[in-house]
Amino acid sequence: MSTDRWLHLDGTANTRDLGGLPTTDGGTTASGRVLRSDNLQDLSPADVHRLVAEIGLTEVVDLRTTAEILLEGRGPLRDVASVTHRHVGLLPERGLRTDVFAAEVDDDELRAQLPAGWGESVLPRQVGPGEEAEPPAVRSYLGYLTDSPDQVVGALRALATGGPGAAVVHCAAGKDRTGVVCALALAVAGVDSETIVADYALTAQVIDAIVARLAATDTYAEDMARPVEHHTPRADTMRRVLALVDQRWGGPLAWLEQHGFGADDQVALRARLR
């Protein structure tokens, strides 16, 4: 897959454009509409200028948990008045459903709500019935769809209705939570399964840099202590997830339809990405 969609920023390791991908009807996804990324709190002033002034970024869809945002920070884009931030956490927060962007990051009361053992909620491996034999990443991705469908739909709806400029969707590494949301978005845009798989696997090219960034933080250091191979995305992972979505729900579009992301939503997201 072409790698000219990468955005080489000072403060991220895994930012790229979802534009330029072929669709099944002979078209392509549009550039400068939706970006995918790892976390954004380390963006430099030059990065912010490039994203806002040159690319036209107007929306951030943050898939991290409340704990991650409070501990790692929202990043400099939070200070840009023209950029809207939407928090749509995909991981269970032990009942904590605070809208973190409604409060200041130094709010002691909000920090006090962090559950004991919050680190266990970072990158969990959820196991559903009949999934015991699946690889951990496959189980985790299926967990987003079965345990957090409203959040997945919310993230896609934010991408569909946001604007008028570009949007960036991100989590911590930009590969797991972001990978599933982007896979569904690309399916709506008419991108075929193997191209979706290839886009997901493209993150492997920068996995060393991703792991190095996360390992330097207290929040993710323990998880990053495992060998880099543990974190490297593999094409077979997303290929298996898409196959199971086909088997269980009739495909990505059918999953979306069954979970409230209907025809109008899909038309809006398709228009955003095409």
Image (cartoon, rainbow, N blue to C red):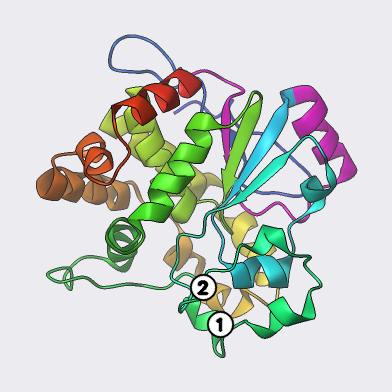
Residue at 12% of width from left, 50% of height from top?
248
| Membership of 47 in magenta stretch | yes
Q: Position of residue 135 (x, y in %)?
A: 26, 66
Q: Is residue 111 left or right of residue 4?
A: right
Question: Disc 1 residue type?
Answer: Trp
- Who is closer to the viewer here, 180 or 87? 87
The answer to whether marks 2 and 1 mark residues whose Cβ atoms lie closer than 8 Å is yes
Q: Position of residue 150 (x, y in %)?
A: 37, 53
Quarter placement of the N terminus: top left
In this rendering, is residue 189 above or below 58?
above
In this rendering, is residue 213 above or below 238?
below
Quadrant of the image occupied by residue 80: top right
Question: Disc 2 residue type?
Answer: Val
In this rendering, is residue 140 above or below 237?
below
- Please tell me how crowded label 1 is: few (under 14), some (14-19), or many (20+) other residues with Cα within 10 Å: some
Residue at 51% of width from left, 73% of height from top?
122
- Who is closer to the viewer here, 64 or 2? 64
Q: Is residue 229 left or right of residue 118?
A: left
- Who is closer to the viewer here, 169 or 98? 98
- Which residue of the protein is positioned furthest toward the top in this rendering? 26
Q: Is residue 142 left or right of residue 268?
A: left
- Which residue of the protein is positioned furthest toward the bottom in this rendering? 116
Which circle, 2 or 1, is nearer the viewer? 1
**Which label is found at residue 122?**
2
Residue range highlighted in magenta: 29-54
Can residue 198 be seen from the camera position used here?
no
SS assignment at label 1: helix
Q: Pointer 1: what residue?
A: 118
Q: Is residue 66 left or right of residue 269?
A: right
Q: Position of residue 61 (x, y in %)?
A: 59, 46
Quarter placement of the C terminus: top left
| Membership of 133 in magenta stretch | no
